[in-house]
Amino acid sequence: MEKKLIIFIHIPKTGGTTLNDIFKKLYAENEIYDHVPVEAMNKHFSQLKEEEKKTLKAISGHHFYGIHDLFSKSYTYFTMMRNPIERVISLYYFLKTYPGYYQENMRNMSFEDYLDWDPQAKNGQTQQICGIHSQISLEKAKENLKTFEVVGITEMFNESLLLLKNKLGWNDIAYKRKNITKSRPLLQEVPTEIIKKIEKNNELDIELFEYIKSNFIRQLKDF
């Protein structure tokens, strides 16, 4: 029986860069598409011979649910979610100095303006799980989550790794933390009005995170 294609949906600022370093170590270069843009990935895969296509085992990247439709393989997903308020704070301070598009556009952008400007800061986690062309809703996200082997929690990173190791048969989960936003303030240092706006813009993410967290804790108890 053909093994399932393992797809890692990398949601920005959830510990995904650290997790991806662990994940990609498991595969040879020709067995994984690691953060390859969708169009380039689709073009490359379509040009492979049928025998070569069979070597593909894994995909990782800032993709949206539904990426499996590009490949004629059975599949399963995994991802990591983070407390939405912490995630949006981290996003703003990370992207403000990220070279290129974000740095140029956000150079003089206030935090409040950023919250209106960037789609990632508005229920971005739920949107990735729903899919790029899907209407965003908790019902759709929960339906799609049925095809996820594990949804980890950033705040419980080590426990998430143990679940991934158990569910997906990973053998080496040693890691060094990567891509940490060092310049961001603590949660209690962020103005109350900003926190309230983040909460308003991320009501679906907050509800989905609580749903995921309760399921995750239940999985740990059964582990």
Image (cartoon, rainbow, N blue to C red):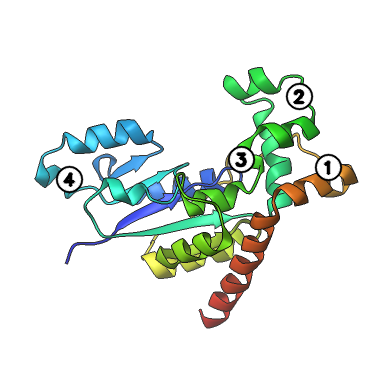
Give the vertical position of 218 relative to 69 (above or below): below
The secondary element bearing badge 4 is classed as helix
Mark closer to the observer (2, 4): 2
The secondary element bearing badge 3 is classed as helix
Crowd tier of the residue under label 1, counting other residues whose Cα lies within 10 Å: few below 14, some 14–19, many 20 or above: some
The secondary element bearing badge 1 is classed as helix
Q: Looking at numbered disc 3 in the image, what kind of residue is underneath it?
A: Gln
Crowd tier of the residue under label 2, counting other residues whose Cα lies within 10 Å: few below 14, some 14–19, many 20 or above: some
What residue does disc 4 label?
53
What residue does disc 2 label?
109
Q: Is residue 38 left or right of residue 150?
A: left
Mark closer to the observer (3, 4): 3
The numbered mark at residue 194 is: 1
Residue 184: percent from left, percent from top: 76, 37
**Direction front: furthest residue:** 135
- Label 2 vs 3, first from the N-terminus: 2
Q: Looking at numbered disc 2 in the image, what kind of residue is underneath it?
A: Met
**Are dots 3 and 1 in contact, CB under 8 Å?**
no
Q: Residue at x 70, y 55 (%)?
A: 203
- Label 1 vs 4, first from the N-terminus: 4
As measured in the structure, the alpha-carbon distance from the residue carrying label 2 to the one carrying label 3 is 16 Å
